[in-house]
Amino acid sequence: MVLTKMEESISNARTTYEKMMAERDALKIGEADLKARMDEMKSHHKAKIEELKLESADLAAKVEDLQATKAWLLSEGAQVLEKNVHRGPEMTAVVAAMNNAMSSIRVNSGLHQGYVHALKKKTPYAEALLNRNAEADLNMAVACYESLTFPLVDDLPKLINEPLSKIKDALFFAGGASSKE
């Protein structure tokens, strides 16, 4: 009976040992599987980090480009626009049409005054209506037109670091319009 109990005890110990060895092997397999998953996750995360770094660099370059574009538009672009509007055919056509209309009125008035003076036998050189400096006045008016500037355009470079809402407010103040329209 003692021998049977010893054999039974050895058999139980062997079974327990085999179970423990099987559990150990399962744990080693699980550990290897877990390590493989962790390595895969690390690799995936490294790839994702590199992808995000590239995306971040691309976005930073775009931001720099947008800031440079904004700076150019506010400092030089507005002046280019001003010159193009100022010297454009639309502006010169309107100014020429107004000038021609005013000239016609002045010519008609001048002819009328001339006939009145002729009938009164007055010499035009003694009359105040004759403008001997008309050509100089015209040259001065042309120079004034050519040097015409717009204070808003000159002030735009000061808005380089401002948000778009402030830039819009500055651009729309003139005619009573607002940037919300």
Image: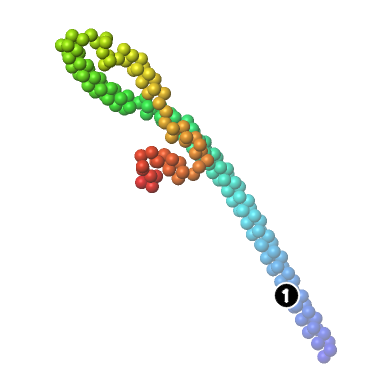
> Tag count in the figure?
1
Q: Residue furthest left?
A: 119
Which amino acid type corresponds to the residue marked 1 in the rendered image? Lys
Q: How is the image coloured?
A: rainbow
Residue 44 higher or lower than 123, as above or below:
below
Residue 41 visible in rendering: yes
> Given the current orientation, which residue lies at the most extreme bottom position?
1
For residue 78, what is the image quadrant? Answer: top left
Considering depth in this image, is 123 or 110 the residue closer to the camera? Answer: 123
Residue at (83%, 87%) from the top-left corner?
3
Find residue 91 and report its image quarter. top left
Observer able to see residue 62: no
Circle 1 is placed at which residue position?
19
Is 160 rendered above or below residue 45? above
Q: Residues within 10 Å of mark 1 (few under 14, many from 20)?
A: few
Q: 63 or 150: which is nearer to us?
A: 150
Residue at left offset 25%, top offset 22%: 102
* Residue at 49% across, 39% down: 159
Left-right relation of 50 to 149: right
Image quarter of the N terminus:
bottom right
SS for dot 1: helix
Query: Which quadrant would residue 121 be assigned to in this image?
Result: top left
Left or right for 34, reference 145: right
Tell me residue 162's x, y (percent): 50, 42
Please determine whether, in this image, residue 122 is positioned above or below residue 153: above
Residue 83 pos. (x, y %): 40, 27
Residue plotted at (20% across, 18% down): 108
Image location of residue 141, percent across then percent down: 36, 20
